[in-house]
Image (cartoon, rainbow, N blue to C red):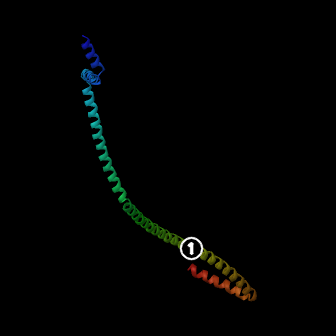
Amino acid sequence: MQEFISILKYILQSNVINFILMLIVLAWCVKKLNLNKSFDESVLAVENGIKKSDSEKNNAKKNLDKAKSLIDKLPEDITKLKKSAQEKGEIFKSEIEDNAQKSILGLEKNINRTIEVEEKKISNVMTDKTIAASIELSGIQIQKLLKENPDLHNKFIMDSLDELDKVNL
C-alpha cells in the first residue's frame, strides 16, 4: 500500500499528469459549456467582418476612382464653363448694346420732335411779334403820311367806301 501511495503522490506531483488532467477538465468544460459553438460563431463573425471590410474597401476604391476621374475632368469642365460664360457675356453685351442703340435712336427722335415743336412755337411767336410790329409800324407810317398829306385821308375814306359798295353788290 505504501507503494501505491508513493505512486499516487508521484503522479499528483508530476507535471505531465497535471497537464493531462487539465486538458481533460478543459475538454469537459468546452463540451459542457458548448464553447465550440461559441468559438465557431466568433470565427464566423470575424470572417464576416473581414468580408464586409473587403467589400467596403472595394466600394471605397471605386468611389476614389470616380472622384479621381472627376478631378481629372475638372480643369476641362472649368474651361468649358469659362467659355460658356464668355459666350453668354458676349450675347448679353451685344443685346445691351442693341438695346442701348435703340434707346439712343428713340431719344434722338424724341429730341428732334421736341426741337421741331419748339422751333414751330418760336416761329409762331416770332411771326406774331413781327405781324404785331408790322401793324404797329404800318399804323405809325400811315398816321405820319396822313399828317404830312391830309388829302390822302379823304382819298382813303373814298376808296374804302368804293370797296364797300362793291361788296354790297
Task: Please state the horizontal and vertical placement of residue 57, each as a whole percent of the image.
Answer: 31, 45
Q: Quadrant of residue 133?
A: bottom right
Quick one: quadrant of the C terminus? bottom right
Residue at disc 1, secondary structure? helix
Q: Quadrant of residue 13?
A: top left
Which of the two residues, 87 or 99, is positioned nearer the viewer here?
A: 87
Residue visible at 31% across and 44% down?
56
Q: Quadrant of residue 146?
A: bottom right
Task: Please state the horizontal and vertical placement of residue 125, each as a whole percent of the image.
Answer: 62, 75
Q: What's under tag 1, amino acid-wise?
A: Ile
- Give the vertical position of 43 relative to 100 (above or below): above
How dense is the environment of label 1, judged by Cα within 10 Å: few (below 14), some, or many (20 and up)?
A: few
Quick one: quadrant of the N terminus? top left
Which of the two residues, 17 or 45, is positioned nearer the viewer here?
A: 17
Which residue carries the number 1 mark? 115
Which of the two residues, 165 or 99, is positioned nearer the viewer here?
A: 99
